[in-house]
Amino acid sequence: MTTPRKARRIARTLFRESFTDGRLDEAKVRQAIQQLAAAKPRMLVAILKSYERLVRLEVERNTGRVESAAELDGSLRGRLMAQLQEIYRRPVAVEFHVNPALIGGVRVRIGSDVWDGSVSGRLRELSAAL
């Protein structure tokens, strides 16, 4: 069952009001949820589900995950973060993880964008091409 149009519209309005200086403000998100809970509108669950989806997508859009086969040193991490912020033209929170299964190289994921420069990724591409 799809969310009623009115609930989605209310959720979008709350979402737009949850920003401060172009960034999602956690305090405003909490405040919006508290106001909804206090008001108890007729479509409370539908509004909250739609609002949660919008907030989740925004957080994913601004959060990156960098996996590497070995631990990256500080200067390389800094250069990588600077390059990602230059590409996206906004601050991106980046989490660094070590994944030995990559064999070598780096895999970067920000939102739905994935850059796979790992050896295991290239081997997968080669085997698919054969």
Image (spheres, rainbow, N blue to C red):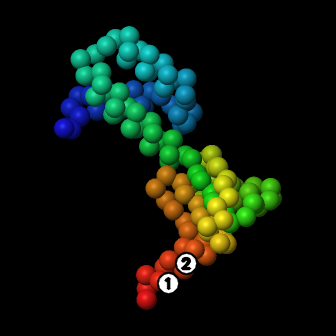
- In the rendered image, residue 54, in percent from the top left (x then y), is placed at 40, 38
Name the residue at 65% across, 72% down: 103
* Disc 1, SS: helix
Q: Dividing the image into 4 quarters, which one contains the C terminus?
A: bottom left
**Mark 2 residue crowding within 10 angstroms, few (<14) / some (14–19) / many (20+):** some
Count of marks placed on residues: 2
Q: From this viewpoint, is residue 33 visible?
A: yes
Task: State the mark number for residue 126.
Answer: 1
- In the rendered image, residue 99, in percent from the top left (x then y), is placed at 64, 61
Task: State the mark number for residue 37.
Answer: none
Q: From this viewpoint, is residue 86 visible?
A: no
- Does 125 appear above or below 62? below
- In the rendered image, residue 63, in percent from the top left (x then y), is placed at 57, 47
Q: Dividing the image into 4 quarters, which one contains the N terminus?
A: top left
User: Could you tell me the amino acid type at mark 1?
Assistant: Leu
**Mark 1 residue crowding within 10 angstroms, few (<14) / some (14–19) / many (20+):** few
Name the residue at 50% across, 46% down: 60
CB within 8 Å, label 1 to label 2: yes
16 on left or right of 39: right
- Does 83 appear above or below 62? below
Per the model, the C-alpha gap separating discs 1 and 2 is 6 Å
122 on left or right of 130: right
Name the residue at 41% across, 15% down: 35
Q: Quadrant of the rendered structure where residue 48 is?
A: top left
Query: Which residue is disc 2 drawn over?
Result: 122
